[in-house]
Image: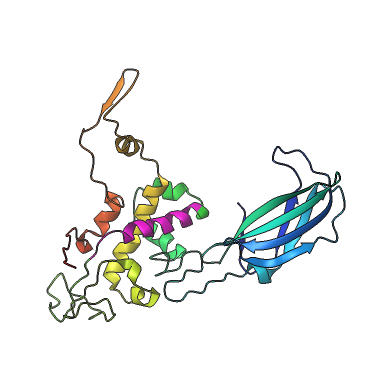
Amino acid sequence: MQVFLAGTNVQCVIPLADRSGAPLNAQSVRYRIVDQANAELQPLTPLDDFVAGAADVQITVPASLNALGATPTEHTIPTREGRIVELYLTLSDGNETSQTFIYAIEPVDVLVTGLNSFQSYAQAQITAIDIPNTPAWDCATDEDRYAAMIEARWHLCKLSYYLLNCNLNFGQDSLNFVPEGVYQSKYVATDSLFMFDGNLELLNADQFNALPERFKGALRKAQVAEADAILSQDVVASKREQGITSDAVGTTRQTFRSTKPLDMPCSKRAMSYLSYFLTNSKRLART
């Protein structure tokens, strides 16, 4: 799928062919434009400049129809949207058929800190400098890195966190000292401890940016490490997840431990950066 910058004109060149690739002899064309939710952006319109028998159709979708509908407020994320150009063709034999052309639009900055990522793309590239041995990340395209970073954030949000206690309880001689002081939000415990439910999805962008830099730094490293794990192919891990305990190719044999490995939402390396902030405890409640 082609991806274009949001808020710009998009020139669509659509070949006229059936599903087997055979050319269609169209005599007239009408079209309409909808978004990914099938909301109509432009009603059915005749293509007046179409030349009968042409091999393709050229339609310019104006910038006004390529504007992103979302704005970065609270938990709303202005990421990619889709546009679908629907063609309705009248053929030389009088029959009618339809075709669709789909493309995506995106903002200049796909990764929005505190909304769909823990850092911008530029920051992620700087973070990666301090993380050795990330071959999949190093070889990936920008588009693949965007997708991996967004996916990595979802993986990391599945973990349960507890944050550092504020410096009202611990002085600078404590490992739990937080120079930023008390974090005030509706998710903070009533006893003023620097704690919340552990679900990073509950925080909006402003609340996320107010978190301690030490914690955000760990999240940035963990996100890049997890993105590298997502982009890589771990053959052994895949075989173990499928239940394979022994693998033989010719005279080469591999035997894996029969017990199933612990199923975690993200890689060990990513979790190692966050180990100081993670909790595996479960809470019981009566309702």
- The residue sitting at 35% across, 18% down in the picture is 250
Q: Position of residue 102 (x, y in %)?
A: 64, 55
* 149 falls in the magenta region: yes
Q: Tell me: 210 left or right of 139.
A: left
Which quadrant would residue 170 be assigned to in this image? bottom left
Q: Position of residue 179 (x, y in %)?
A: 23, 78
Q: Is residue 129 visible to us here? A: no
Magenta highlight range: 144-161
* 173 falls in the magenta region: no
Q: Position of residue 163 (x, y in %)?
A: 22, 69
Q: Measured along the vertical axis of the image, is residue 257 above or below residue 116?
A: above
Q: How many marks?
A: 0
Q: How is the image coloured?
A: rainbow
Query: Of residues 24 and 149, which is closer to you in this image?
Result: 24
Q: Position of residue 226 (x, y in %)?
A: 35, 53
Q: Measured along the vertical axis of the image, is residue 117 above or below residue 191?
A: above
Q: Tell me: 23 left or right of 247.
A: right
Q: Quadrant of the C terminus?
A: bottom left
- The residue sitting at 75% across, 54% down in the picture is 88
Query: Of residues 166 and 105, which is closer to you in this image?
Result: 105
Q: Magenta stretch mostly in which secondary structure?
A: helix
Q: Measured along the vertical axis of the image, is residue 28 above or below residue 202?
A: above
Q: Is residue 35 visible to us here? A: yes
